[in-house]
Image (tube, rainbow, N blue to C red):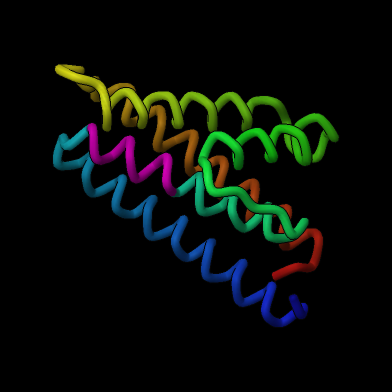
């Protein structure tokens, strides 16, 4: 992949992340907590895909992408463990709220997940700028 192609991909993934954050905010404001958690998680996931692209890594499973993040960016000290915890929590909540039966969502959970997603996306974007990839 050329540098220009990578840059375009990173910008595209970050725009997806920011759009998902905007959607999460709108859903949270409308008290649609299940959707808010879903969109907050996807904001993180799109930012994660941008990170993985910088190392030419990918996987077809969300859990695989998260494992790659932990291996390549957490265990190596690039990002603090708190980002991994936020990502794992958002993934678990999305799974529960999207696929669980008769699961009630809590407004606090969606607000916390959105805050974690915002921090995650901002951290990824800052890293990519520091690495001069954007």
Say if 104 sits above or below 38 in the image. Answer: above
For the point 29% across and 46% down, the residue is: 25
50 left or right, relative to 29: right
In percent of width and height, residue 44 lies at: 50, 45
Q: Which residues are magenta?
A: 34-42
Say if 51 sits above or below 84 in the image. Answer: below
Say if 26 sits above or below 81 in the image. Answer: below
Q: Nearer the viewer, residue 123 or 94?
A: 94
For the point 38% across and 60% down, the residue is: 19
Query: Quarter-wise, where is residue 5 in the image?
Result: bottom right
In percent of width and height, residue 128 lies at: 72, 59
Is 41 included in the stretch rendered in magenta?
yes
Query: Quarter-wise, where is residue 91 in the image?
Result: top left
89 left or right, relative to 3: left
The residue sitting at the front extreme is 60
Q: Nearer the viewer, residue 7 or 125?
A: 7
In percent of width and height, residue 75 lies at: 81, 30
Q: Nearer the viewer, residue 7 or 31?
A: 7
83 left or right, relative to 22: right
For the point 22% across and 32% down, the residue is: 33
């Amino acid at each position: 992949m050329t540098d220009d192609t990578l840059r375009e991909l990173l910008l595209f993934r970050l725009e997806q992340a920011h759009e998902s954050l905007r959607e999460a905010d709108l859903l949270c404001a409308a008290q649609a907590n299940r959707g808010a958690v879903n969109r907050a998680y996807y904001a993180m996931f799109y930012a994660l895909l941008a990170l993985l692209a910088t190392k030419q890594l990918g996987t077809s499973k969300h859990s695989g992408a998260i494992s790659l993040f932990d291996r390549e960016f957490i265990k190596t000290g690039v990002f603090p463990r708190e980002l991994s915890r936020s990502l794992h929590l958002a993934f678990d909540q999305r799974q529960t709220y999207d696929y669980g039966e008769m699961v009630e969502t809590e407004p606090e959970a969606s607000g916390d997940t959105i805050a974690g997603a915002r921090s995650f996306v901002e951290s990824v974007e800052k890293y990519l700028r520091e690495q001069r990839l954007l």
